[in-house]
Amino acid sequence: MRNFLRFGIIAFIFCCYTSNLFAQTGSSIDKYLGASTKLTVIGSASDNLAVPQDLKFSPVPSRKNELWVVNYGDYNKGGNMVIFYDAGKPTQWSEYRHDSHSQHFMIYPTAFAMGSPDSGYFSTTGEALNNTGDPTSTFMGPVLWDSDTTKFARINQNNWVNGQPLGSHIDMLHQSPYSMGIAFDTLNSYWVFDGYHGCLYLYDYQKSHGYGGDDHSDGKLLKYKEVKLKRIPNLPSHMVVDKSTGWLYIVDNGNRRIVRVDTKSGHLGNDLNAPNETLQQYSEMVGVKWQTVDSGFTNLSGIAYSDGRLIVGNNGTGDIRVYNTMTLAKPTYLGTIQTANPGMVGLTIGPDSNIWYVNRTKNQVVKLTPTGVAPVDAILLSPATGSSQVAIPAFLSWVKMTGAASYHLQVSLRSDFSTSLLDSTGITGTSMGFPNLNNSTTYYWHVIAKNSAGEGKWSPTWSFRTIGTKPNTIALISPFKSAVNISLKPTLTWDSLIIATGYNLQVSDHGDFSVTTVDQNNIVIPHFGLSGLTAKTQYYWRVRGLNDGAIGDWSDVWSFTTLDPASVKENVLITSKITFDEIYPNPTSGNSTIAFTIAEPIHLRIAIRDLLGNEIDVLASENFESGKHSITMNSALLRSGTYFYQFTLDQGTFLKPFVVRK
C-alpha cells in the first residue's frame, strides 16, 4: 500500500422525490449543455499575459476571487505569474510577478496546481531538460512556492548572488524533466506528468526547506511506471484529481486520449536510485488500477472537474468535451461546449461556477458563461428558521420555483458556509431528508435554483437546532468515594459526556439532598471548585448531564469529609506557599497551561497522572524562585479523558484536573 495517508468523510442523504438511496448529483457544468455561450475577456496582453499556460483560483476562502495565471516565459528569464485580484468584478486589477530565480525554478512552466487552503502553497512544473545547457543533465522537476503575496517573488530577490538565498521558492525536486502537467494530491504531495520518462510520478515535498533553500533530502517520490504517458512538445497535458473518489484524470495528448488513475490502488515495488539528489524515498508503485476514459483526439490540453463532471479542452478547436464521472464503469460523454476560440490550454471552474480558461494564442483569460433566463430566487419552507428540538432525520423543504430545473442545497455548521456538511446539486425535488445529524446542534441551510441558463441567488440562510438525547449517567472521579481529609476548597471532577451541553451539580451535608449547599446548573466543563465548606464535615455530591432535549439521571452519590482543624492549619501553610490560577484551555486538544504563584523559593515536582494514578510524564522537578510561573503540556500523545497536574512539595501534594478531548 502507498505510504501516503488519506482521510475522508462519507455522508448519507435521502431525497423524498427519488426511490434511490442517494440523491442524484448534478453539476454547474450541466447549464452549458444545449445552451448558447458568451465569451468575456477578463485579462489580456495589457495585463502582461504572454503565452499563458494555466490558471487557478486561490483555494483560500478569503481569497476565492484571486486568480493566478502562469506565463511560459523564455530560457534566459524563465516564466512568471500574473495575479488578478477580484477577478471578473468591476474592482478587478492585476499584478505581474517574476521571481529573480525563475530561470531555474520556473523555466518554461506548463502547468501549476494550488495546494491546501491551509498552507496556501502551490507547485509549478516545467518543460525543460535543465537550465544548464548540458545535453546529458536531467536536473529538473516540480517546484513548491508560497502564494502569500508578501512572499512570492518579493523576498530573497537577487541576481544569483553567491551565498544568498535562491529567490522565494520553498522546495524543488529534480527527477522529472519535460514535465507537462501537475495536480494537487494532499498536504505537500503533487502528481506530475513526466514527459522525459513517459509516465506518472507522485512527488511529496514533505516539509518545505524554507524560502530560497536547497535541502531536498526529505523528498519522497513514487514512480508509476505502468501508467504510460507521451508528451507532445509545447502542448501542456493538464491533470486534475476528483477528491471525492481519488480518481486522477490526465490529458495524455501524445497518445491522443484521456486516462484516469485510481490513486488509492497499487503497492510499493522496487527502490530506485535518484541520479540528481539524495532523497528519503524513491520507489516504484506497481499494480495500479488505471483506464482510458476516451481516445482518438488531437490537441487536447486543459482539464477540470466539478460535481461529477469532467471537462476537457481542445487547443486546436476551442471545444470543451463534457463527461459524467458518476457512471459506474467509466465516465460517459455528455456533449461538447463550443467556443469557436482556438488556442485554449489551461481551464478551471471559477468560484462563480463558470468555466474560465487561458488562450495562449491571443494572450487572454476568458470567462465562459451560458446565456438565457435564470430562475428566480429560491424560497425556503421548513423547518422554520430558528426552530429548536427538530427531530432527526430532519426534512428540509422549499417552494417549487418557476423555471427551475434543479436545486442546489447546502447545509453547514457555519452561517458563512465556509465549510459544508452537505453540498448537493442537481436535486430535482423540493425536499431532502438529512439523517446523519448530531443531537443538540445548530445547522444552517440555504438553497439556490438553477436551469440551463444559469442560477438565481441563494435564498436567505435559515437555521434550526436538533433535539437532544438523554445524556448517559455520569461517572464521578474525584475526590474519591468516602475520601477523608479533603481541603475546604476542593475541586470536584467527573467524566465528560460528548452529548451533554452542560452539567448540574448538587452538594449537601444531608445524604437525601433535602438541603443543598451547592445546586449549580449549566456547568460547561466536567469539574467545579467549591469554597466556604465547614471543617471536619461529611458532604455528599452528585452530578447529571444536561442538553437541549433532556436531563440525564443522577450519578451515584459519593461523599467526602473535610479536614479537621489541625489539618487545616497545615493546609494553610501549604497554600500560603503556592496558589494556582485556572488551567487553560480546559478541555484541551493541544497544549494545556497552568499558571501558579510561589510565595518563597521551594523545590517543586510537577507530573501528569491519569485516573488510575499512573504517572504519564514529569514536567519539572527543580527549585523555583518566588513569583509567577507557568507550565505547558502538549496533549498530542494523550487519549481523550481526565488527567491531573500533580504538584508535590515538602508539605504535601496538590492535584489539579484537566480534560483532553479530541
Image: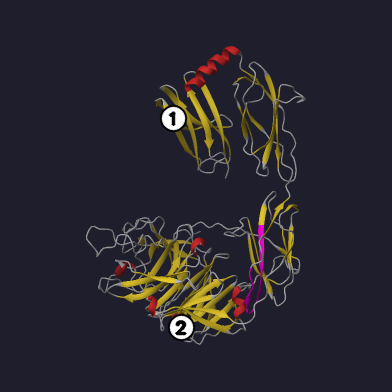
Among the two numbered marks 2 and 1 on one chain, the one whose residue lies closer to the N terminus:
2
In the displayed structure image, the side of residue 286 where residue 471 appears, left or right:
right
Residue for badge 2: 315
In the displayed structure image, the side of residue 380 where residue 625 appears, left or right:
left
User: Considering only vertical position in the picture, is 17 above or below 341?
Assistant: above
Q: Position of residue 557 (x, y in %)?
A: 72, 28
- Which residues are drawn in magenta? 444-457
Can residue 201 be seen from the camera position used here?
Answer: yes
In the displayed structure image, the side of residue 583 where residue 206 appears, left or right:
left
User: Considering only vertical position in the picture, is 138 above or below 605?
Assistant: below
For the residue marked with disc 1, what is the amino acid?
Lys
For the residue marked with disc 2, what is the amino acid?
Asn
Residue for badge 1: 628
Mark nearest the camera among 2 and 1 is: 1
Check disc 2 and report its element: helix, strand or loop: loop
Q: Position of residue 35 (x, y in %)?
A: 61, 83
Residue beneath the point at 60% across and 58% down: 9
Q: CA distance from mark 2 to mark 1?
A: 69 Å
Q: What crowding class fits label 2: few (fewer than 14 Cα within 10 Å), some (14-19), or many (20 or more)?
A: many
In the displayed structure image, the side of residue 513 where residue 131 appears, left or right:
left
Check disc 1 and report its element: helix, strand or loop: strand
Q: Position of residue 111 (x, y in %)?
A: 42, 72
**Secondary structure predominantly adopted by residues drawn in magenta:** strand
Can residue 194 be found in the magenta stretch? no
Most extreme residue toward the top is: 566
Most extreme residue toward the left is: 162
